[in-house]
Image: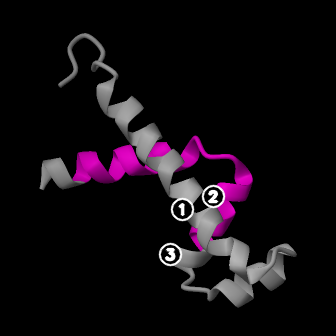
Amino acid sequence: MIVELEQALTVRAALACLPDHCADVLDRFFAREESYATIGAALGIPPGTIASRISRCLERVRRNVEGISATPAPSGGR
């Protein structure tokens, strides 16, 4: 259970490092379950562009998670 909590906190920190446009599109797609058409209309982006934007933003999340995971814990930390 501790491992899952640590993973969730790492992902949350990685999301917090994203630019607003990435955070917004990922929130709309994954948390709000909005369609590409709905996201596109709200953001003024063609719906066909949403998939590539989600893919690029998820890649940023992955890199952020790897960077956070590679950072050593402070002294006395785990």
**Separation of residues labelled 3 and 1 (CA atoms):** 12 Å
Residue at (72% x, 53% y) in the render: 20
Quadrant containing the C terminus is top left
- Indicate the quadrant containing the N terminus: top left, top right, bottom left or bottom right: bottom left
Badge 2 crowding class, 10 Å Cα cut-off, few under 14, some 14 to 19, many 20 or more, is some
Closer mark to the observer between disc 3 and disc 1: 1
Residue to which mark 3 is pinned: 30
Q: Where is residue 51 in the image (x, y as percent from the top left)?
A: 60, 73
- Which numbered disc flags the more N-terminal residue, 3 or 2? 2
Residue drawn 68% across the image and 64% down it: 24
Query: What residue is at 15 percent from the left and 49 percent from the top?
Result: 2
| In the rendered image, the vertical position of residue 62 relative to residue 32, given as above or below | above
Write down the region rendered in magenta: 5-27
Q: Can residue 32 be found in the magenta stretch? A: no
- Tag 1 residue: 55
> Which of the two labelled residues, at mark 3 and mark 1, occupies the earlier sequence position?
3
Which residue is at the front of the view, 41 or 15?
Answer: 41
Label disc, if present, on residue 23 of the rendered structure: 2
Q: Is residue 78 left or right of residue 57?
A: left
Q: Position of residue 25 (x, y in %)?
A: 65, 67
Numbered-mark total: 3
Disc 2 marks a residue whose amino acid type is Ala
Cα gap from disc 1 to disc 2, whole angstroms: 12 Å
- Whether residues under marks 3 and 1 lie with C-beta atoms below 8 angstroms apart, the answer is no
